[in-house]
Image: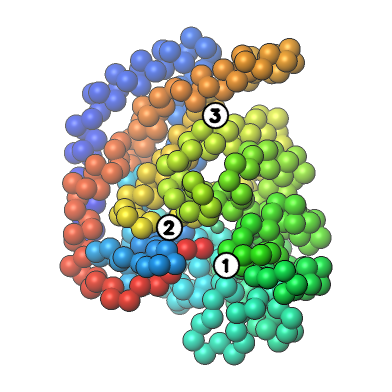
Amino acid sequence: MNTITDSLIEQQNELVLPFLKTDYEALGERLARTGIDIKAVTEKVSAFGVAIPSWGVGTGGTRFARFPGRGEPRDIFDKLDDCGVIHRLTGATPSVSLHIPWDVADAEDLRAKAAQQNLRFDAMNSNTFQDQQQQVHSYKFGSLSHTDSATRQQAIEHNLSCIELGEAIGSKALTVWVGDGSNFPGQTNLTQQFERYLDSAKTIYKSLPADWRLYTEHKIYEPAFYSTVVQDWGTNYLIAQTLGDRAYCLVDLGHHAPNVNIEMIVARLVQFKKLGGFHFNDSKYGDDDLDTASIDPFRLFLIFNELVDADLSGTLDQRLAHMLDQSHNVTDPIESLMQSAMEIQRAYAQALLVDRVALNAFQEDNDALMAAQVLKEAFRTDVEPILAMGRLLKNAAANPIAVYRTGNYREAVAKQRPEAKVGSSGIV
Ligand SMILES: [Mn+2]
């Protein structure tokens, strides 16, 4: 039962509207003094959407344990219900990214449920990093780059089946991440392993429908701890270059060494037209899959600063895939996903406030201090009234988490969804 009703949202919005109007007008006046039209910013931010990973609405876990939450989704249809609530409240998550085989279901049923929840399907994610029941060949020693050709073929066919289901539900992209690599020096021939990966990827790419894109995702380490076949953006770029025009690099924020300058990687990939999109999350130490902007909101802002800069210069790909990829261990996943989607909109709004004329002048003058201050000034601006007003204008909730809690959605679904006894991994 969905307790998040239109009337609940309207009633809650009415409570905050007077204060919101005052704050919005005050911010509008302030921005107008620097020549920024708050309405234009609000419209852009409000139109910005990010895809929810189907696996994100369940509690994740670590390699040690998973502690299931109450009322967890039992299958993809429950997951789509939860995603529908997130989108209804935030207006920021119009699509869902499926993971196969976890989400395999009848295409017709998937389409019907998505339509009911006002959602569409984003990129399909293949899974050749774990073995499934009745699988003939094991991925213990790799998948697309495995030494055994039958294992590689099985992994290729799995990806083709993801495309097939994706076509039936209106998806336009396939995201491939493999855990292939090695745990010991000497375990694999690094060159031959990459050659095998490229051969397999070429076969998948050949089967890509004409209007589809292939996103490959790099990751520095884990589950392989000595070497990973697609370890960084350089290798990822080589893959995209080798495969062709419809192959792009996907940047998962957590898949880099600590302190790596991710915004610079973004700038390079944009410049050479190979940025496909993002998996947003945050991290402190490794691929922590923490909530987006929970640790380093400034880094997220700097990434969006590059995207806005590229957009203004006409070099930004308008089909970028923006997706969340997080694991929620101690929070209600619905709340985390709503907060994360809003943090992404916040970073985008702040990046739109950067005085680019001033920034360019300071860069030309080599005035490092003032150039940095231009960015800081935009980052310091509290854009919450813009985000809240943007949600209000599209009949979403001004304060999604407050409405979600008032609606007691989790309590209501917990009555219908029995507690999960055995957990499954949720980290990708
Ligand atoms: Mn990812």
CA–CA distance in space, label 2 to label 3: 26 Å
The disc labelled 3 sits on which kind of residue? Ala
Residue extending farthest to the front is: 185
If you read the primary sequence from the N terminus, does the residue marked by circle 3 or circle 1 appear first? 1
- Amino acid on which disc 2 is placed: Ser
Image-quarter location of ligand 1: bottom right
Residue 271 pos. (x, y %): 75, 39
Decide if residue 43 is in sight here: no
Q: Residue 224: horizontal and vertical position, in percent?
A: 61, 67
State the residue at coordinates (65%, 51%): 276
Q: Is residue 284 above or below residue 52?
A: above
Q: Which residue is mark 1?
A: 223
> Which residue is drawn at the image coordinates 64% and 70% (left, top)?
183
Q: Name the image quarter holding residue 309.
A: top right
Identify the mark nearer the N-term, 2 or 3.
Answer: 2
> In terms of depth relative to the viewer, which is nearer, 257 or 213?
257
Q: Type of residue at label 1?
A: Pro
Query: Which residue occupies the foreground of this view, 205 or 369?
Result: 369
Q: What label does residue 351 carry, if any?
A: 3
CB atoms of marks 2 and 3 within 8 Å: no
Q: Mark on residue 327?
A: 2
Instruction: Give the distance between the C-alpha atoms of the residues marked 2 and 1, in whole angstroms.
Output: 16 Å
Q: Nearer the viewer, mark 3 or mark 1?
A: 1
Kind of element beneath mark 1 = loop
**Residue 248 location, quadrant:** bottom right
In the image: residue 301, left or right of residue 25: right
Query: Against 151, is 222 above or below?
Result: above
The tag earlier along the polypeptide, 2 or 1, is 1
Residue 373 position (above or below residue 211):
above
Q: Using the rendered image of the protein, determine whether residue 423 is visible from the camera's viewpoint.
A: yes
Left or right of 230? Residue 101 is left
Callout 3: CB less than 8 Å from ligand 1: no
